[in-house]
Image (cartoon, helix red, strand yellow):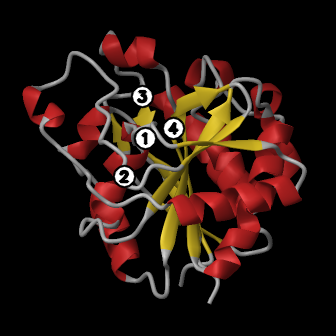
Amino acid sequence: MTAPALFVSHGSPMFAVEPGRLGPALEALGRGLRDVRAVVVVSPHWQSHGVHVGAAAQPDTVHDFGGFPDALYRLRYDAPGSPEIAAEVIDVLRDAGIEATPDALRGRDHGAWVPLRYLRPQADLPVVQVSLPHELDGAGALRLGKALAPLRERGVLVVGSGSLTHNLFEFRATVHDPEYAQAFADWVREAVLRRDVDALVDYRARAPHAVRAHPTEEHFLPLLVALAAAGSDAPHWIEGGMTYGTLSMDSCAWGHA
């Protein structure tokens, strides 16, 4: 059975303790997973020169954020890693012409462990993280996702973890202007549902308020990774709502009934 592909908005680290609408939706999706043997996650919180693949047998839970309540820093997600799955990931990437390097020291950042706390709370599946190269653009994100796609046929869930909108200046300034963020999120939703890949790659020129929604691109690119990993599978949009005025938690799954 082919495992699903998933784009999940992890928003603020507060999502770890504030499930909102997306948390229960991810829990329901996770309960429906069948025959998934591992999870591969691409998160914007691990950026590197070139592609790196987490190869630790038991990655640490990394609290890569500051200024949040103490309760967040006590959370852990102790799913195992897998050097064997990491080697499979490296092989499929190299088969696609993408050189990849194993990293047996890197821990698991909050872009990976926060959504997985809802999707797989029992933490029983090996989770392997793949870095997001600094130099990646939209076309490169599609290439990375397409390279990871064969893993799905081996029972590996491919997750692109980002945020549908991600203006941290406005988040920190407590700017409450959901209209522009919702307009951008609605545009992305329609483009995904009609499978308009060209528009999504060119979103900064075509989408309303794109640069305001994403002053930098790293939180948008995991959507393109997941989209490419999904291949021809139909998208299922997950309504996540808007948190903190400007952070859309909308997400999308492919290949999941």
199 vs 106, left or right, is: right
Report x, y in % for residue 164: 54, 40
Is residue 242 or residue 84 the one in the foreground?
Answer: 84
Q: Label 1 is placed on what type of residue?
A: Gly
Which residue does the numbered mark 1 point to in the structure image? 111
Q: Label 4 is placed on what type of residue?
A: Gln
Is residue 100 or residue 239 the one in the foreground?
Answer: 100
| The quadrant where residue 139 appears | top right
Q: Which residue is drawn at 80% across and 37% down?
A: 138
Mark 2–mark 1 CB contact (< 8 Å): yes
Mark 3–mark 4 CB contact (< 8 Å): no
Circle 1 SS class = helix
From the viewer's perspective, is the residue at label 4 or at label 1 nearer? 1
Residue 115 shows which numbered tag? Answer: 2
Q: Residue at x 49, y 78 (%)?
A: 37
Report x, y in % for residue 220: 62, 36
Q: Label 2 is placed on what type of residue?
A: Pro
From the viewer's perspective, is the residue at label 3 or at label 4 nearer? 3
* Between discs 4 and 2, the one toward the N terminus: 2
* Between discs 4 and 1, the one toward the N terminus: 1
Which residue does the numbered mark 3 point to in the structure image? 246
* Between discs 3 and 4, the one toward the N terminus: 4
Which residue does the numbered mark 4 point to in the structure image? 182
Q: Distance between the residues labelled 3 and 1?
A: 18 Å
Relative vertical location of residue 12 with respect to residue 135 in this rendering, above or below? below
Circle 4 SS class = helix
Label 2 packing within 10 angstroms: few (<14), some (14-19), many (20+)? many
